Image (cartoon, grey):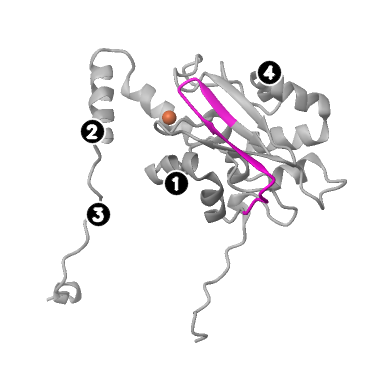
């Protein structure tokens, strides 16, 4: 008898239950392939492409706008054109060359001020500006976030560790199939004289969704140092 056989508990299932949406996705995908709308190879290429995307271009867009008022105005007036300067072509960069109905859309940049804080949600499902921000974090897609952010934004932001003064108005932007939002936060103190590269590093994904504020001492999510867990009882 091997060591593992002596365990008297049942192993946890390797995969959680498959949701109705996943069943629907597989069914529609297989039907599309069967009808010749696209091939399995197209789908693989698309999926791999989507997983190469991340929040860096949007971070750079914000950094550039902090340094250049004319570029900031372009971000407000024509975000598709402004995105080209950070290497994102909303129209032609997709493997399909024409985007998808859900990704070629109407991006908007929401500019925070000292008295106005924007935060983004999709109450209906999970709409997100993927071409410039990558895949959405898991919490963004949860019913908890989607339902509560629109009702109690100040409370939910405080759960993210963002306590805003009462005189700061919070405006929640609800994404939809065509309109996708990116938040442009205020440039933080302590970044005077910084280069565009330095500024880009502190504009994290969460800052671009609006649930965090950039700080001079906190770099982008994937570069944060990992601290060892400390035993709560001091052992
Ligand atoms: Fe959605």
Depicted 231 relative to depicted 55: above or below: below
The mark nearer the N terminus, 2 or 4, is: 2
Which quadrant is home to the N terminus? Answer: bottom left
Q: Report x, y in % for residue 22.
A: 27, 35
| Residue picked out by circle 3 | 14
Nearer the viewer's eye, disc 2 or disc 1?
Answer: 1
Residue drawn at point x = 52 percent, y = 85 percent:
234
Depicted 28 relative to depicted 205: above or below: above
Mark 1, secondary structure of its residue: helix
The mark nearer the N terminus, 4 or 1, is: 4
What is the number of the mark on residue 78?
4
Q: Is residue 5 left or right of residue 33?
A: left
Q: Residues within 10 Å of mark 2 (few under 14, many from 20)?
A: few
Residue drawn at point x = 17 percent, y = 74 percent:
7
The mark nearer the N terminus, 3 or 4, is: 3
Q: Which residues are magenta?
A: 163-181
Q: Is residue 115 left or right of residue 34?
A: right
Nearer the viewer's eye, disc 2 or disc 3?
Answer: 2
The mark nearer the N terminus, 2 or 1, is: 2
Distance Cα–Cα, label 3 vs label 4: 46 Å
Q: Is residue 175 magenta?
A: yes
Q: Report x, y in % for residue 56.
A: 63, 38
């Amino acid at each position: 008898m091997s060591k593992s056989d002596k365990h008297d508990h049942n192993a946890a299932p390797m995969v959680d239950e498959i949701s109705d949406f996943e069943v629907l996705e597989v069914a529609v995908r297989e039907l599309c392939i069967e009808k010749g709308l696209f091939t399995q190879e197209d789908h693989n290429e698309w999926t791999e492409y989507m997983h190469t995307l991340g929040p860096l271009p949007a971070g750079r867009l914000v950094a550039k706008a902090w340094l250049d008022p004319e570029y900031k105005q372009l971000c407000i007036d024509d975000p598709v054109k402004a995105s080209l300067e950070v290497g994102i072509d909303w129209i032609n960069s997709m493997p399909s060359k024409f985007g998808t109905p859900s990704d070629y859309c109407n991006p908007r940049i929401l500019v925070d001020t000292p008295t106005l804080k924007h935060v983004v949600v999709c109450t209906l499902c999970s709409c997100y500006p993927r071409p410039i921000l990558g895949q959405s974090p898991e919490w963004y897609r949860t019913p908890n976030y989607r339902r509560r952010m629109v009702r109690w934004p100040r409370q939910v932001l405080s759960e993210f560790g963002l306590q805003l003064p009462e005189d700061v108005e919070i405006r929640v932007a609800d994404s939809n199939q065509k309109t996708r939002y990116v938040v442009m936060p205020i440039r933080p103190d302590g970044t005077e004289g910084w280069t565009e590269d330095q500024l880009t590093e502190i504009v994290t994904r969460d800052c671009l969704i609006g649930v965090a504020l950039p700080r001079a001492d906190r770099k982008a999510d994937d570069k944060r140092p990992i601290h060892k867990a400390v035993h709560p009882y001091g052992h």
